[in-house]
Image (tube, helix red, strand yellow):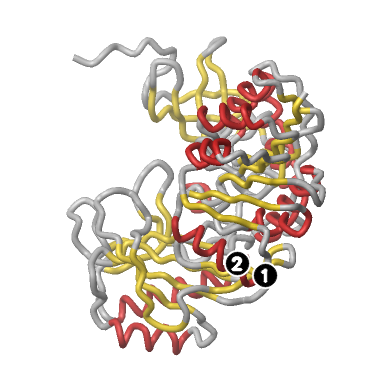
Amino acid sequence: MSKKIDAPVTKNEELTVSVTDLTYEGMGVAKVGEHFPIFIEDALPGEEVKIKVLKVKRNFAFAKLEKILKKSPNRVKAVDKRYTQAGIAPLQHLSYDKQLEFKQHQIAEMFKKDHIDVEVNPTIGMEKPMQYRNKAQIPVRMINNRLETGFYRRHSHDLIPIEDFYIQNPEIDKAIVVVRDVLRKYNIAAYNEVTHEGLIRNIMVRYGFYSHEMMIVIVVNGRDLPHAQEITHDIMEKIPNLDSLMMNINTGKGNKLMGDKNFMLEGKNYIMDQLMGTKFMISPLSFYQVNPFQTEKLYKLAIEKAKLTKDDIVIDAYCGIGTISLAMAPNVKHVYGVDVVKEAIEDARTNAKLNHIDNATFVVGKAEKQMKQWAEDGIKPDVIVVDPPRKGMDESFIETVLKMKPERLVYVSCNPATLVRDAKLLEEGGYKINQPVQPVDQFPQTPHVESITVFSRS
């Protein structure tokens, strides 16, 4: 027997409400009574809206926007409603200057809730906040017996067919359409995640911002690609400047986007690009920031705020292919980098050689374990730089940082919630935030925000 939900609204109920806030996901918030929030996609603070309740939980509800009765002055015309439905650009209806304010406010509120007294600078934005992504991972599905590419409707795996993705480099969008049409020509079936049948799971495209080199990876549920020779020929003919055409094997039944094995169909098994004047070799599984315009601003600021000297020993945890490590190396005595992805570390070592950098050491492993090992080996960093995944830093990692006692820890964060959680532990361990937190808008038109926070030993 299901529990009775004691809520002030019911499913399918129509209401008129005033929107007072935005959630960290960019949804409008309206309150019924004093404490019951309703989350509404596409609604903005200051608006009066007519809504229809879609889902009711014990402490909150979700609703659909039916009509705007009073419009926010910060609302702009949406480019395409599908971008909101698919979560590609859920803030496209909010003016860009207000998007930047929202991101600053989001970080400030997180610190405020945990009673950490910090200043948060205005968000550094983009002059042209669209067509910025240098990488796309596009799902493939059969719709009406035809292979389609697009993006999932938010909170589902229902595919919305899309050809122009708005936030991606236009060359990427063109390449996806070419691959889709060639696969259709040879009647290649898309993967079905329910039956685990069909072949094409997704198409990944990388595009070098400076080099203009392109890589296409076709991710398949199997060991072979039927008509591989013909498909390769047709794609290369239609994209004559294509540098790398790869096939990735992913036969798992989970949501993992790519498998561990790659096979070259044509060209090279990597592409080249550069960041802050440093060359990088990028392979299919490499982590490489997706917004090259903003990444240079982000990393330059991180390095500037680290206040590096020629005598410094630096640890770059979660180093990926060495983007921050190799940019710091010319300014310090030695850099140590660690990442759990073997291929990323192989790329980092190759990138060090490419740039004639011999004062960087890269190790495969979990950051928290490798930090302990380095501590046992007597390595005493002056500065630690971290750019962790959304889940933030492991508690054991922070414990090791506190034992190593670096002068500064530079935290590049993609998740304000885990940044603030980790900040509390660092502050309890004797570190202080003595300068403003700096948000950088890596993902315009979305609620996501990156930021740089510097912790100094007090």
* Cα separation between marks 2 and 1: 6 Å
Horizontal side of 152 relative to 406 (left or right) equals left
Left or right position of 87 against 203:
right
What SS does tag 2 mark? helix
Q: Quadrant of residue 257?
A: bottom left
Per the image, label 1 sits on a secondary structure element best described as: loop
Residue holding disc 2:
351
* Residue lying at 59% horizontally and 73% vertically, measured from the top left: 272
Label 1 amino acid? Asn
Quadrant of the rendering where the C terminus is positioned: top right
Q: Residue at x 41, y 48 (%)?
A: 153
Cβ–Cβ below 8 Å for labels 2 and 1?
yes
Report if residue 178 is visible in the image: yes
Residue 222, by quadrant, is: bottom left
Pointer 1: residues within 10 angstroms few (<14), some, or many (20+)? few
Determine the image quadrant of residue 228: bottom left
Q: Residue at x 80, y 33 (%)?
A: 436
Q: Write the residue at 35% across / 74% down.
A: 263
Image quadrant in which the N terminus is located:
top left
Q: Is residue 55 above or below residue 214?
A: above
Residue 317 image point, x, y percent: 58, 44
Position of residue 60 measured from the top left corner of the image (x, y, whole percent): 46, 20
Label 1, on which residue? 355
Whether residue 113 is visible, yes or no, is: no
Q: Which one is nearer the viewer's eye here, 302 or 316?
A: 316
Q: Which of the two residues, 95 or 413, is positioned nearer the viewer here?
A: 413
Across the whole image, how many numbered discs are drawn on residues?
A: 2
